[in-house]
Image: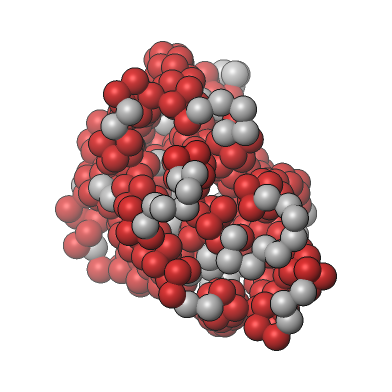
Amino acid sequence: MVACIPFFYLGLNSGFSTEYIYQQDFNNTMTEDIQSWIGSSGIMFSFISSLVSGYLIDKFGRKTLLYYIYGIHIVGWMIIAKMKKILIGRLILSLANGAGYVSTVYLAEILQPQHRGAFLNLKPVLEIFGSLFVYLSGLYVSIETISFAISICALILFSCVFFMPETPYWYVLKKRKDRATESLIWLRNKDDLKIIYEINEIEKSLDEDVLTFKKTILKIKWWKTFLLFSIYMLLLEFTGFDMIIPYAVQFFGKFNRTAIDNRIIGIIFISSAFIGAIVTVCITEKFKRISLVKSGHILNIFVLVLSGFCEAYFHSVEFSIVSLTCICIYGSTISIVAYGLPTTIITENLPTEARATIFSSLSTEFYLIYFFVVKFFPIILANVPIYYVIWSIALFSLFNYIFIHNFLKETRGTVLPGNKDYT
């Protein structure tokens, strides 16, 4: 679980801005520009750390990067809690958030195939719970108190990393078969012929020439895989979730005509996403991944079009309730269409010897787009009718569906061209 907690911290980072803005902007005098900098500062430098960690993760190991992630969280959250330097603290935290994919790589390399899908889908559960934790805690304590508690937790987790093994894959990459065997014995809690067999399978999955970061970038056969998922990553970023969560109160304030506080609506929205993420974990291994993702997008298109229709043509409290309900249904699919299953599909398709480097490159792209999306979303909310915003998200759900239907294959049974490490 220690390797999973960085996902929780990603959620804390996403939920922080909406709670901070709510607590500080009592008179609604904070400009959209200031709000956008508060929201986007937490990911401003993430693309840099994501790119650099692609080199570091292969050179120094997955475990070493987990030390780095928790160390940055200790410093960043403590600066927010004690020095009250919000932007400085969040800029520092952005360096940890960019390397968050290390947890995905670590889990993918230590888990057995039958458990991999469910565990990788813990990412959205923990990430969404992180945002929900900030939303709920903000009802009772200040954002500085929340930040201090988060920093102390990071310190404890930093200590726990010491007791974790490095992944056997990394040891094999470094030609240290004895250490790989020790790691696998620790992970499987047994010492038998199956361990030797698994080590041999890991060796078979690797090229004879161990790939460095530079060699992977230059190796032509991985470019098709990279470009395919690069387009997929681009489309995913406009499914709307990463826009709404940092500014939930402001988003729902644009069309909530009920007596319910916008903050409570935000909590309901993120709670529906949390429940949906738990359900996704339970059904991941029972249904085909691609079918689930496509079904999620079909549902999203329907409820988003309906929500936008209610806002465009009706302005009563009753239709506002219908619209808000549709958005909460949309939120419940977050793990299926944007966070959990897409990450699982991408991870399972990446070849072992290039997994860290390609994942690093995809994460770099993701955080660059993420920064600009979060930076300009408050400005868009202030100047574009909300129904156009909602319909735009529905349109990108349609684009996602078309792309998935035509280009992605079921990861449980088909390997993309050029990929040979696949479960």
Residue 56: image location, x then y, percent: 24, 38
Rendered residue at 53%/57% (across/down): 250
* Residue 282 image offset from top left, x and y in percent: 75, 46
Instruction: Depth check: give the residue in front, 52 or 80.
Output: 80
Between 272 and 113, the one nearer to me in the picture: 272
Q: How is the image coloured?
A: secondary structure
Task: Pinpoint residue 335: horizontal percent, then vertical percent.
Answer: 63, 54
Quarter of the image with the N terminus is: top right
Rendered position, 229 above or below 397:
above
Residue at left 75%, top 55%? 259
Q: Is residue 294 above or below residue 189?
A: below
Residue at image location 43% in from the left, 56% down from the top: 350
Q: Position of residue 300 (x, y in %)?
A: 68, 71
Q: Residue at x 45, y 69 (%)?
A: 382
**As drawn, which residue projects farthest toward the right?**
318
In-front residue for pair 324/10: 324
